[in-house]
Each structure stands twice: as C-alpha cells, then as structure tokens.
Amino acid sequence: MNRRESVDYSSILGQIATDKVKRLKSFILLISLSLALFFILNILIYQQGYAYTLVVALGIFLFLHWFVCEDTLPVVSGIFIWTLTLLAFFFAWNIEGLYDTSLLAYPCILVFCAMLNSRLLIISTTTFMVLSIYCLAYAEYIGLLASPLAEFADWRKAHNMALVLLVFASVVYLLTKDIDRLLERLVKMHVNSLRNKTRTQRKALTNRLTLLPNEIACAQYVQGRIYRHHQAEQLSALMVLTLNNLNSINASLGFDIGDKLINMIAQRLHTLSEDNAKIFHSSNNQFFIFIDETDYHDIEAFAHQALQTTFFSNYVEQYEVEVSACIGIAIAPHDGNHYDALLRRAHTALTKAVQMGHNQFAFFDLEMEQQSKARLAMLVGLKRAIEQQEFELYYQPKIELSSNTIAGVEALIRWRLPDNTLMPSSVFIPVAEASGLINEIGIWVVKQAAKDCLTWHQLGFNQLGVSVNASAEQFKKGNFGSLVLKTLKQQKLDPSYLDIEITESLFIEDEKNIQAQIHQMVSQGISISIDDFGTGYSNLNYLTKFNASTLKIDRSFIKNMMHERNQYHLVDAILKMSHAIGIENIAEGIEDKSTANILMQLGCRYGQGYYWSKPIPQQAFCQFLINWPKHSKAS
C-alpha cells in the first residue's frame, strides 16, 4: 500500500470509528432510558427491591456515554455488552429463572454486538449466555432458585433456548463477517475511486508536455488569489507570454525539436517562480504568469526576466534555435477583479506587445480595449460585407507619360457601408489580413477585376490590363497562384492582362514558397510589380528573384521631389537603377503637369495620380475611357 492509499484508508477507518462511537452512544441512551423506565415501574408498581441495582447500572451506562470516544471504543463496547448481559442474567436469577422475560434481552444483545461489528463479543457473550441458561436450569432443578415456576423446571426448555441462542448467534456471526467483507470491499473501492479521481484531477490540471499547471489550474489559483487580494487591497498581475516564432521552428526543424525547446523554456521560467510568482503552461507557445503582492516596478522587472529566459542561446540537439517572445500584462484589481476579465485584457495587451516588435511587453490600458472592440466590430462587419457583397472596386489609370495614353489600370477595393459611406482599404485590409479573411476578399478582387477588364475590351480598349494588390497573407497557404489562375480561367481573361502588385514586406516571408507561386503565375503570363518601392527593404536581389517587371516608386518620394533635392536625386537614382536591370517604372502620386514632365525627363515611362484621375467606380471609369481621347487632346 502506497503512502497515498494508507492515508485514504486511515481517514476512512477513522470515519467508520466515528460512526461506531455515535452508534454506541445511541445504544447506551436507549438502554439508559429503558432502565429509567424499569426503575420507575419497579418503585411504583412492582414494589421489588432492585432499585439500587437499576441505579448502579444506569450510572454505569451514563458514565460509558460520557467516556466513550474513538480511542476508548473497544473497552466501552465490551463493558456495555457485558453489563447488559450480566444485568439480564441477574434479573433472571432473582425473579423467574428460565421463564423470566429478561432473557429476551439476550438476542438483542447479540444484535448490538453485530451492529458494533465485534465478532469477539459475539463469541464470548454467546458462550456465557448458553452457560447461564444451563446454570439457571440446574439451579431450578436443585431448588437453589426461589422462582415461583421452579417446580416446572424443564431441561428441554434449557436445550431449546440454548439451541435457539446458538443458531441466532451463528447467524449474527455470519452476518457480521459478511458486513466486514462488504465494508472492506467498499473501503477499497472508495479508496480506488478517490485515487483515480485525484489522478484524473492532477492530469486535468497539468500540461502533458511540461508538467506545469495548465490554464484550468491557473483559473482556479488566480481567482482565489484575486478574491483574497481584493479583500486586502493588494496588487496582482496576470501575464501572458507567447513564443512568436514557434510555428516556423516546428515547420523547419520538426515538432520534436519544438517540444524540447518548450520544455527548456518552461524549466527556465520555473526557476523564476517565487513565493509571489507562479508559472502556468496554457498551450504549446503560451505561458501564464501570476504575480501577487507587488508593485509596478516589480512587475516590469519580472517581465524583463521572463523575456530574457527566451532569448538566451537555445541549443536543442545540434541546432541553435532563435526564439522571440512577447508579454501582455493585466493588473488586478485595476484591470478587473475576475480571472476571465484579466485574461482577456492581458491578451489585448499581448496584441499590442506583438505589434511593438520582438521581445516586448505591454501593460493593458482602456485605449487598447477600445481598439480591440473596434477591430472586433470591423471583423464582424467584414464577414457581413463578404456575404452581402458590400465591396466595390474603384479604378485609377496608369498613363504612359510620353504619349499621354492609358497603358493600364489599377484596381483599388472600397467597402460601402450600410450608411452608403465608403471605407478605404487602408482601414479594413489590416484587419482582414490578421483574421485570414483577406484570402476570400483577394480572390473576389481578382474575379471582379477580370470581369471589369473584359468590359473595357468590349468597349474597344483591348490593350488594357488590370493590376490588383496582393498581401503576404494571401501567399501563406501556398495556393494563391493556383487560385488566381483558376479564377482567370473561369472568367475567360487571358493571364497576360493581369498584373499582381506586391509590397517589399513580402520579401521577409517564406521566400521559397512565395517564389514558387510567383513563378507559377509568371509562367502563365501574369506580370509582377513591386509596389511602394523605397519604403521597405529595397533589396535589389529580390527584384530578380520574384520576376518583377515593373517597379512603382512610392508617392512619398514623388510628392516632395519638386521641393527637396535629396528626394529628387533619390528618384533619379531609382530610375537609373531600374533601367540598368531592365525594369520599367511607374511613379505614383503625380498631382500636376510639372511633376509629370520632370519624371518624363528623368526617364520614367509611366505615371499614376490625381493629375489624370482619382480612383473611380467601374461605371464612371468606363465613361472616362470613352472620353479619354478628348481629354488627351485637351491636355
């Protein structure tokens, strides 16, 4: 029997002993009441001289009632049973011998022995009872008893009574054995049940990988601490620490390496545990930390320590793994006095920390929650917009500067809200990217742009192609190229009429995966443009790797080039570099003729901006195309 089991057995046996004490006290009170009644009857009716005997017996029983406890239970049980037995024999001896009603107490006494679960008392008292019956019979036979019925003494009665007592005692003895076995079986079943329940609870409250307490344990622990601290007006902090790049580690090195890394970090975090800090492992890449009885300075210091445990050198087998983490912090009671509220707000702060960059932590504030609610409301609206087709495409022409002809068109998505106002893409696209809805929206853009492009062709503008923007999120699943080509095939638009505009932020993603998708599209005739060049990484090596045919110079350079010489020279350098590697240029944000003329002099071939047209819906753009020759002559 292990230690846990012995503890369970002892506690259960202690409970059984307590129940026996209560039962014995009940028996003693019952007998004491009976003796008191006999005493009253003896004084008032029977007029027999046994009052002193009854008083002595009553005194013994009352003393036993006071004296009995778990430690004295065996002794008191024996005294109680033997006192009853001797008292019954005393009355039988002094009154009517074998014919005295006091002998009817013998079976009741044996029942008491069984209920007290004492086989030794059953054997010993049964033996005495049988001997006492024969003793009474012999005493009557020789005339020793002064019983009025002595002349009727019959050995057969003694034999019958002894036989009945033996049978009754045997039955009681067997029942007692059965009760013992049943009780032992029930105790063992109960102990096993408790042990299984404890084991199940331990598993339910423990993370299987790191064996640290899990989120369920965290909820129970934190809620209890928050309640006590609320009473004492103390400060507590719930931190949510997440490992940012665990998924890429699992994808590149395998889940075994990832699991070992998590265990390594869990052990380091566990070393930070103190009396006022407790670590929990919620999910693979997320840990919860609860600190109580502290101040903001201590919380900041602990957050720094927790982050340091993650960006130490992490050697897992033969690999040196780089890990980054972020922490969101919510303070109780200021940010909430309930676990769910604290956890939600710590996650909100975590989102802010992730936006701040690698190895950062952030405290929750109400502005974060308002932003989070606004993002959630926008997410709900985006789902509705997809279902109810609330998106529209606006188009802006790309102009060849030397001939003042329309060389292409850029599609720009807008969201028409139920109140008929338009929301620009810069507001809702980040939310769509974060939620994954950008994939569905992006394919809708390609489909609608292809339809509208075919309309332009039907109007006679057969040379026009359309450009659509694509984000890094759309390439992550690995099937963006296939979906685009499939959509073009369904709309019956030749791939050569589609241009995909990507930003430089795409370069830091999974290069091989993205490169494969781009090559798939380029091989079918789709062209690739680099949008907002100069505002990101501007790595020239990627221009060739991603088969870019056009480079779009960001409007921030074009806007200031007329007034700032540095910007002018920078644009000039970009144009010369593009010509050297055989890539065309489009200048964005052209708002006047002088800017267009200077760019043309510098060698820029295409331009785009409000000088020619702001983005307009399809119907207006079709009219713009029809009127363009007149507009061109006027210009």
Image (spheres, helix red, strand yellow):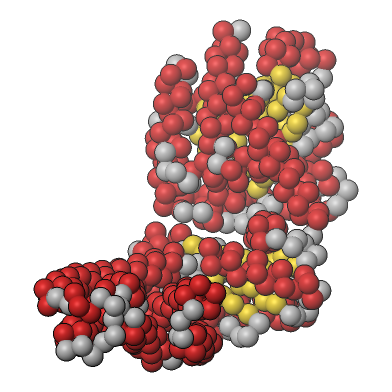
Residue 272 against residue 323 in the figure, above or below: below
* Vertical side of 480 occupied by 566: above or below: below
Q: Is residue 378 left or right of residue 488?
A: right
Residue 498 visible (yes or no): yes
Which residue is painted at 36% across and 64% down in the image? 255
- Number of numbered discs on residues: 0
Q: Which residue: 59% across, 16% down?
A: 452
Q: Where is residue 22 in the image (x, y as percent from the top left)?
A: 47, 76
Looking at the image, which is closer to me, 382 or 86? 86
Query: What is the x, y in percent for residue 227?
Result: 71, 68
Is 583 in front, or is 376? 376
Q: Nearer the viewer, residue 239 or 5?
A: 5
Which quadrant is home to the N terminus? bottom left
From the viewer's side, name the closer residue of 36 and 329.
Answer: 36
Residue at the right extreme of this rendering = 563
Residue 467 x, y percent position in the rendering: 59, 30
Vertical side of 359 occupied by 413: above or below: above
* Residue in the image at 72% along x and 73% along y: 228
Specify the quadrant that holds the C terminus: top right
318 left or right of 291 in image:
left
Question: From this viewpoint, is residue 2 visible?
Answer: no
Q: Is residue 452 above or below residue 239?
A: above
- Residue drawn at x 70%, y 12% is 619
